[in-house]
């Protein structure tokens, strides 16, 4: 470790679908957080760890802030705001807009007293037909909050990411490694694999189903080499029998596709062959049932 090594925590907060998880995966260099075009894809606080010879940045990704409809939503929103405290820097992420959305106003009010610098990060500038909209967005948001820095970026096209990373490091204190050099996340392999499976359900279903499911890993025996198999047994939980039938699909067609797509990600992640068994179980109104939420890891205080 070099002299003047810097390390610290950087929290990501913003509305759903502004690109927080995609940003996390980009800067860590590995698929730590799942992504989709569905709101509420990120449910848990998850840290992605970027380590170089000069710094270690622990990025804390949080659920997108939205209007709560269930007890699960309440817990997700609570964890998003709690995660802004005890960090060294907050990245407030939004997209180019002609007017500030109410959700962003609520978030900014919630982080007004965090006591650390806050950067305004405007993602998806690659989608703009009028570049001047970035300047309009900056002016709108600067009227609402005293940002330490402003960064228009594109995660997709890798625009201004290195500039942002350079300025993030400047805000971190000098200090030692907080995690081992090869650690990529604070979450377990079982958690990340369960998220890969949930991501495939999000991608292949629509309407209420993506929000109504959870995934639990019932048993996992990991192989020790690329030639060995990792045996994984998992359950997809939904709220109604009608949802179960959709997830399974005609003659098991959809559950087979979910399984095949999940196996591809899990193979890359574990660097082994993969045997995956998937089951679907109905747990009525699990998103409003504290006992079920706790058993799935969505605890009230932290998850």
Image (cartoon, rainbow, N blue to C red):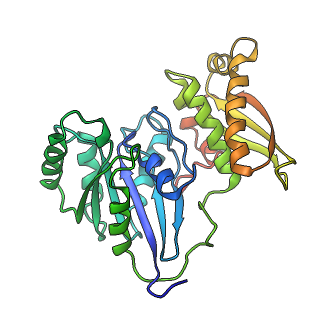
Task: Decide if residue 303 is on the left or right side of residue 133.
Answer: right
Based on the displayed image, in which of its 4 quarters is residue 252 positioned? top right
- From the viewer's perspective, is residue 227 above or below residue 49? above
Left or right: 25 with respect to 248? left
Residue furthest to the right: 228
Residue 192 in the figure: left or right of residue 168: right
Q: Residue 143 placed where, x, y %?
A: 12, 54
Q: Nearer the viewer, residue 141 or 113?
A: 141
Residue 98, image x and y in percent?
16, 37
Q: Quadrant of the C terminus?
A: bottom right
Depth check: 259 or 271 in front?
271
| 16, 242: nearer the viewer | 16
Q: Is residue 42 visible?
A: yes
Q: Quadrant of the N terminus?
A: bottom right
Residue at the image position 39 percent from the left and 49 percent from the top: 158
Q: At which x and y percent is residue 280?
A: 72, 28
Q: Look at the image and tell me whether residue 301 can be seen.
A: no
Q: Residue at x 48, y 52 (%)?
A: 26
Residue at (52%, 76%) from the top-left corner?
A: 53
Provide residue 42's location: percent of width, then percent of height.
Answer: 50, 44
Above or below, 189 against 180 in this view is above
């Amino acid at each position: 470790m070099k002299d003047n090594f810097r390390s610290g925590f950087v929290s990501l907060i913003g509305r759903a679908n502004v690109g927080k998880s995609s940003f996390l995966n980009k800067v860590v260099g590995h698929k730590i957080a799942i992504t989709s075009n569905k709101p509420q894809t990120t449910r848990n606080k998850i840290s992605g760890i970027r380590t170089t010879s000069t710094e270690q940045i622990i990025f804390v990704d949080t659920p997108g802030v939205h209007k709560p409809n269930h007890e699960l939503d309440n817990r997700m929103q609570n964890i998003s705001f709690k995660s802004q405290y005890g960090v060294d820097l907050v990245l407030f992420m939004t997209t180019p807009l002609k007017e500030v959305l109410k959700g962003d106003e609520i978030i900014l009010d919630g982080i007004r007293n965090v006591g650390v610098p806050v950067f305004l990060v405007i993602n998806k500038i690659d989608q703009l037909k009028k570049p001047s909209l970035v300047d309009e967005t900056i002016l709108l948001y600067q009227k609402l909050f005293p940002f330490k820095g402003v960064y228009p970026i594109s995660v997709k096209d890798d625009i201004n990411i290195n500039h942002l990373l350079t300025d993030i490091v400047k805000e971190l204190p000098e200090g030692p490694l907080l995690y081992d050099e090869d650690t990529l996340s604070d979450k377990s392999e079982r958690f990340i694999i369960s998220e890969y499976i949930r991501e495939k359900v999000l991608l292949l279903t629509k309407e209420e189903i993506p929000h109504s499911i959870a995934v639990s890993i019932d048993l996992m025996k990991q192989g020790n080499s690329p030639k060995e198999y990792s045996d994984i047994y998992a359950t997809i939980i939904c709220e109604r029998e009608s949802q179960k039938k959709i997830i399974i699909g005609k003659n098991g067609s959809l559950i087979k596709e979910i399984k095949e797509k999940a196996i591809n990600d899990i193979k890359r992640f574990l660097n082994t062959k993969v045997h995956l068994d998937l089951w679907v179980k109905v747990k009525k109104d699990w998103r409003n049932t504290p006992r079920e939420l706790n058993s799935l890891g969505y605890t009230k205080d932290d998850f």
